[in-house]
Amino acid sequence: MSSDYPGNPGYDVHALSGAYAVDALDDLERAAFERHLAECPECRAEVASLREAAGTLAETTAVEPPAALRDRVLAGIATTRPLPPEAPAPVSLASRRPRRRVNLLVAAAAAVLAVGGGAVLWQQPWQESSQAPSAVEAVLSAADAKRSSLDFDGGARATLVHSDSVGRAVLVTEKMPPPPPGKVYQVWLDQPGKGMVSAGLMPVREDQRVLLAGDAATATAAGITVEPEGGSDKPTSDPIALFDFGRKA
Amino acid sequence: MDHIRPVGAGAPSPEEGAPGAGPEPSDLAELLRLSARGDEQAFARLYDATAARVFGLAVRVVRDPAQAEEVTQEAFLEIWRTASRFAPDKGSPLGWLLTITHRKAVDRVRSAEAATRRDATYHEQNQPVEHDSTAEAAHASLEAHRVRGALAALTEVQREAVGLAYLGGYTHTEVATMLDLPVGTAKTRIRDGLIRLRDAMGVGS
Ligand SMILES: [Zn+2]
């Protein structure tokens, strides 16, 4: 776009703090700045203070919402479980295995992915929760929802929740670092007879809940791999995380 | 300055000395703490204390009231779900709520279809802010008055850049184009403007 872009000489990443604080960076810049934030306490402090400053502008735009919205919000929370605090972080594992700790960008020995043969159709990119809140909520609040979590070095966590009754799976990530430059995280469902089928690309954001494309009721596992930008038709690297749905027993 | 008219719009009518004006930040923190334990009544009070600012911000960014309601609902659900992750040492409860709201509102307008709609309505904005006559509303208008005063500390181009980025939901690249600025200049104006606003409001440092 211009010389003022990540990777070009003279690019000052610190100067993005203000635009980052008001969500005014594009995805590429945001990923670059979040990598920088991880190692720059000054920028972290500045972003926090500038977010406070920006928030004061909301005083000038206040509008009372319709009363019906209050009812919908309160009905929504009544069926949603608050997350536990991060520190003790109790995690209920669907398969009762101990939590595995893997290095995020190095293929974990524990996570061996069997890639089945067969043509794989490109699936739609996965939907973000903001576009499909009802399906995400349906999975998370389903009576038969099963969860398993993986912790990564550096404090990131990925939790896979699937519900056979809803037939969908949701990936919840916390503190997920951005993928390496030129790479994306891609999510897969292991479908009997088809192998790993793409369930979408992961948007670059630390904390999110995303609905996986594809039928989770037939899948036997879900995995995350690091793929070249744009994604792949089938996994080209070992998974950084693999969630077994525990159907083989 | 037309771009940022909504910031200065509406007659500020500070009602001095309104008793019991608005919940203190510490109260919001307490309500968040209780919400994290699943206390729905505490969350309802949190909603009542903040919904006008959350919804107003969503409306201002996405423009379409129906979509703003969806954004507001998503934001509050996220706030409920992640209340235990609020870190009081990193910012105010309200700042945290609005950060979540803003992110969701921006996600919404950056989807291609929403962008089309938004461009069409960009110049026909100006939704008057109506407050009812509760103590909270009086508090809110006082705060709004303070913010408008603080915005005077910004240069015009800083004010426009901050307004387009935060209230308009535009990227700094888009802001640069809209204000005829070199790309690198817009992000600097946004940052400098926010720093001045922060210092004038005495928040977050
Ligand atoms: Zn920095």
Image (cartoon, coloured by chain):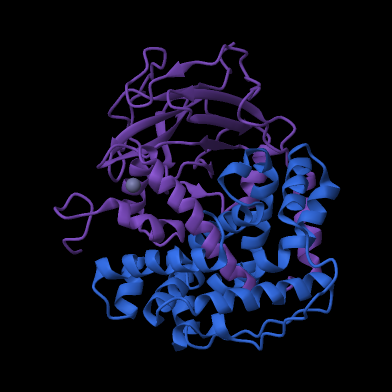
Chain colours: A purple, B blue
Is A185 situated left or right of A215 in this image?
Answer: left
Quarter of the picture holding the N terminus of chain B:
bottom left
How many labels were placed on the picture? 0
Look at 20% across and 60% down and name the residue there: A4
Observer-nearest of B127 and B199: B199
Q: Position of residue B39 (x, y in %)?
A: 82, 42
Observer-nearest of A143 and B100: B100
Is A186 situated left or right of A156 in this image?
Answer: left
Q: Position of residue A110 (x, y in %)?
A: 41, 12
Work out whether residue B101 can be spotted: yes
Look at 74% across and 52% down and name the residue there: B28
- Quarter-wise, where is residue B110 in the image? bottom left
**Up/down of B12 relative to A219, above or below:** below
- Quarter-wise, where is residue B105 in the image? bottom right
Is A148 situated left or right of A21 in this image?
Answer: right
Observer-nearest of A145 and B110: B110
Q: Position of residue A226 (x, y in %)?
A: 33, 32
Look at 52% across and 28% down and name the residue there: A219
Q: Position of residue B58 (x, y in %)?
A: 60, 67
**Up/down of A16 relative to B180, above or below:** above
